[in-house]
Image (cartoon, helix red, strand yellow):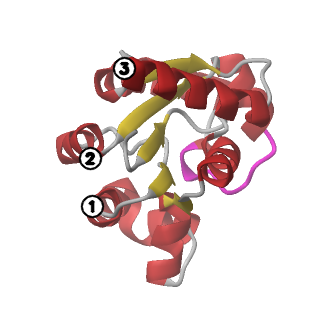
Amino acid sequence: MPANIFLVGPMGAGKTTIGKKLAEQRGLHFVDSDHEIEARTGVDIPFIFEKEGEEGFRKREQLVLQDLTAQTGIVLATGGGAVIKADNRKHLKSRGFVVYLHASVAQQFARVERSDHRPLLVHGDRRATLARLFAERDPLYREVADLVLDTDGKNAKQLARDIELAMQRDTAA
């Protein structure tokens, strides 16, 4: 079995919730890359976006992902835009088992519509922004994924079990 499991997908797909359950099941350490960025900088992500813009945030994210993906024995929940940079995709693909948690735009919207901690959703039509981001990023999620799981209508415990079973099948093959 791979030493690391990396979860990718859009905001609202459940990466953090599912990642915690999966780490618990497998006895691995759980890390959320967004929380790690906040811990290392001492400020929250909306503040980084406000002061440095998305590009400044993406540079910080790239450094954190380079470090985290080099660790062993972790379940990593990445930010929704982690797949944008080619280096991030390369590190994710080569250093662990990557699971794309696919969520419909409707599900994403339902989960994040009231969140004020999502800098990309601060201005404009949230549903339209989610749809645009999904269209841009879905091919990148699929590019790095060893497994694609649809999360709509499923709970975290079941999805963590589904990942576990898929990994066992992958190892047996």
Residue 94 placed where, x, y %?
Answer: 21, 41
- Segment colored magenta: 113-120
**Secondary structure that dominates the magenta span:** loop
Mark 2 neighbour density, 10 Å: few (under 14) some (14–19) many (20 or more): some
Q: Quadrant of the N terminus?
A: top left
Tag 3 residue: 142
The three-letter amino acid code for the residue at tag 2 is Arg
Question: In the rendered structure, which disc, 3 or 2, sits on the residue that comes first in sequence?
Answer: 2
Is 145 in front, or is 23? 23
Query: In the shown orientation, is residue 67 left or right of residue 27?
Result: left
- Give the residue pinned by disc 1: 70
159 w.r.t. 48: above or below: above
Going by the image, does 161 lie left or right of 154? Answer: left
The residue carrying mark 2 is 95
The residue shown at (48%, 28%) is: 167
- Residue 119 placement, left or right of 106: left
The residue lying furthest to the bottom in this view is 42
Residue 129: quarter of image: top right
Expressed as whole percent of the image width and height from the top left, the position of residue 155 reads 80, 29
Name the quadrant containing residue 92: top left
Front residue of 68 and 164 = 164
Classed neighbour count for the residue bearing mark 3: other residues with Cα under 10 Å, few (<14), some (14–19), many (≥20): some
Q: Do the CB atoms of the residues marked 2 and 1 lie less than 8 Å apart?
A: yes
Q: What is the secondary structure assignment of the residue under circle 2?
A: helix
Q: Amino acid at mark 3?
A: Arg
Cα separation between marks 2 and 1? 7 Å
Q: Which numbered disc, 3 or 1, marks the residue closer to the eye?
A: 1
